[in-house]
Image: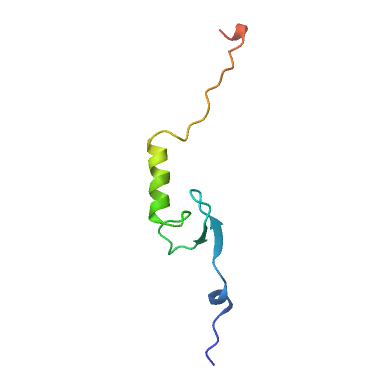
Amino acid sequence: MSEKSPAARIEPRLVSCPSCAKAAPWRTDNPYRPFCSARCKGIDFGAWAADEYRLPESTLEPPDDFS
């Protein structure tokens, strides 16, 4: 008999692409993981390189007795 092992029958987990929200397989053979394509990976890298992913500045003043 040529039955496949249970591990071979498991479907890959699908995650949402961070750029376009399209379903992308979460597999080790997906070179763009967690993205769905080279295009989405490049868009995200461009946004990162342009400092579009930044934490907001804190507007809190230090306490007066902190000096």
Q: Is residue 21 above or below residue 28?
A: above
Q: Is residue 49 above or below residue 2?
A: above
Please name whichever residue, 30 or 42, is drawn nearer the observer in this view of the structure. Answer: 42
Which x, y percent locates residue 42?
38, 48
> Could you tell me which residue is drawn at 55 percent across and 61 percent down?
14
Please name whichever residue, 64 or 43, is drawn nearer the observer in this view of the structure. Answer: 43
Check the image and name the residue furthest to the bottom: 1
Which x, y percent locates residue 53?
47, 35
Q: Is residue 31 above or below residue 47?
A: below
> Could you tell me which residue is drawn at 54 percent across and 66 percent down?
12
Which x, y percent locates residue 36?
46, 57
Colour pattern: rainbow
Count of residue discs: 0
Which x, y percent locates residue 16?
54, 54
Where is the N terminus found, in terms of image quarters? bottom right
Please name whichever residue, 18 or 28, is drawn nearer the observer in this view of the structure. Answer: 18
Indicate left or right for 59 with 19 as reference: right
Where is the C terminus found, in terms of image quarters? top right
> Could you tell me which residue is drawn at 55 percent across and 80 percent down?
5
